[in-house]
Amino acid sequence: MAQGDRIDLCIVGAGPAGIAAAERALARGLRVVLVEAGEFGGVAHNWGALPSQALAAAAERADHIRNARNLGLGTDEPRINFARINARIRAMIEDANATVSPEHLVGQGVEIVKGRARFTGPATIEVAGRSIKAPHFLLATGSRPILPDIPGRDGVPFFTPETIFELTRRPSHLIVVGAGATGLALAQAHLRLGAKVTVVEMLEPLAGEDSELVDIVLRRLRAEGLELRIHTGIVSIAGGNEQVALDIKAGPDEERIEGTHLLFATGREPDFEGLGLEAARVRMQGARPALARFGRTSNRRIFLVGDAAGHVGVHAARHSAELAVDAIAGSAGAEGLVPHVVDTSPAIARIGMTEPEARARFKDRFEIVRIALAQTDAALARAERHGHAKIILDDSGRVVGAGVVGPTASELVPVFALAIARKMTLSELGGLVVPYPSFAQIIPLAAAEYARGHPGAAFTGWRRLLKRLLP
């Protein structure tokens, strides 16, 4: 695209949301400029979700080796080589670069401008000495780690979730501050790779998640050897090279814990540094711009998507970006159901309403069906008994929400998403023929459990299904 050509959409940020937006815009026939100051693929690709999954995969293999006796095999403690793990992660990222590289995007028809963008007015940005004017802007600038203000913090070396992959030697004792989804996933990975790990959390671990599902994860983590300090504040930090000490306080009691490495996983905040949103006349609401539907800001030319808009997870970021582009192109559809996933082992995945949300909407006119994954033959065969499904139904038996904790949670939850979207009853969903043996057996098992308390449910469900299918 020549510099003088008309631009329909200027995207700032080439992470998952920005790239998804660019590809969607091209499919809608829009002329696109994509601005990026750093690495293409963003945090998720280079320092976040992708390397985290690779680290977790190595840790899971180590755990399988360590516990092979559960399957009747002889076991030895796995030999961990952090340098090789790190090298494999970097190589894997390089292999994945093909789909997020500037060359790939240029080949599709996206104009790339490298540099830091700054709004100079409501419809203009300046980047790399060039002024870009467009009818619409889409901001996909991502987020950055939040670092707690603790006395002594700046005097000790520490890691964030973006820098922890620089480790080439196994930490003897990793102290993780923060028991959210990222903190616990990284803590468990290092634990399984042979490090001693202590997690310190001021509040509840995995706050905001269903405590019923969280309890299963925490029991597993503690059984694996994780030391978890909750309702614990940090008074101060001290230390030096591979020597860190935290003075902590739980209630009136104070003590000191010592480790070799420190990781802060205390949340993220949107990254608007240097963007000049005030010049763009964007009204703020706390740390983020006030947003209307599809991420539109108070400046109707400007949309905010992805992590910067509070959409957690690559899949959620991409979805928000595609919806925003559809709105810009005048073909906006309904917002889809977005799964929420916690990548511990076992993982947590949920969709639709939570129990508190169902109680607020339906009062006592809803029902919960619970099934342990241990009831499936797949769990017995694979020696994977840690898991639980919680399905929320309205008073007509329709699925309105579901949460699964277990080894295949993220693969199971889309089935419940489809049921919610199609307004299916649990009885209708139970009519699915699932492979044997598989963890998907929880679906017919849950339907059978529901039918025991509702004798007419199976017939009603099939009648509804036939009515929908027949002309």
Image: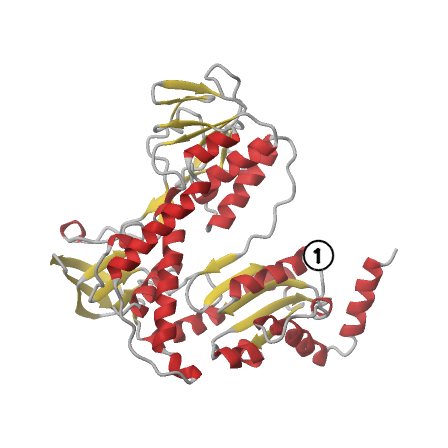
Question: Camera-side residue: 77 or 433?
Answer: 77
Q: What residue is drawn where x is 46% and y is 66%? A: 347
Q: Is residue 106 above or below residue 443?
A: above
In this view of the protein, can residue 13 be seen by the observer?
Answer: no
Residue most toward the bottom? 72
Total labels: the figure holds 1
Q: In the current view of this chain or complex, which residue is farthest to the right?
A: 471
- The residue that mark 1 highlights is 422
Q: Report helix, strand or loop for mark 1.
A: loop
Residue 85, percent from left and from top = 30, 59
Residue 224 in picture, x, y percent from top left: 34, 75
* Type of amino acid under label 1: Arg
Q: Is residue 359 above or below residue 380?
A: above
Tell me the colour scheme of the image: secondary structure
Instruction: Give the x, y percent position of residue 375.
Output: 57, 80
What residue lies at 65% left-to-right and 34% top-to-bottom?
Answer: 331
Q: Residue at x 51, y 16 (%)?
A: 5
Q: In the image, is 193 to the left or to the right of 31?
A: left
Pick the residue in front: 288 or 462.
462
Rendered position, 435 above or below 314: below
Q: Determine the residue located farthest toward the top in the rendered image.
A: 4
Residue 351 in the image: x percent, y percent? 57, 59
Q: Residue at the spot x=38%, y=65% of the render?
A: 205
Query: Can residue 69 be spotted in the picture?
Result: yes
Q: Is residue 215 left or right of residue 147?
A: right
Q: Nearer the viewer, residue 352 or 435?
A: 435
* 459 horizontally vs 191: left or right: right
Q: Quadrant of residue 253?
A: bottom left
Quadrant of res 143: top left
Quadrant the C terminus occupies: bottom right
How dense is the environment of label 1, judged by Cα within 10 Å: few (below 14), some, or many (20 and up)? few
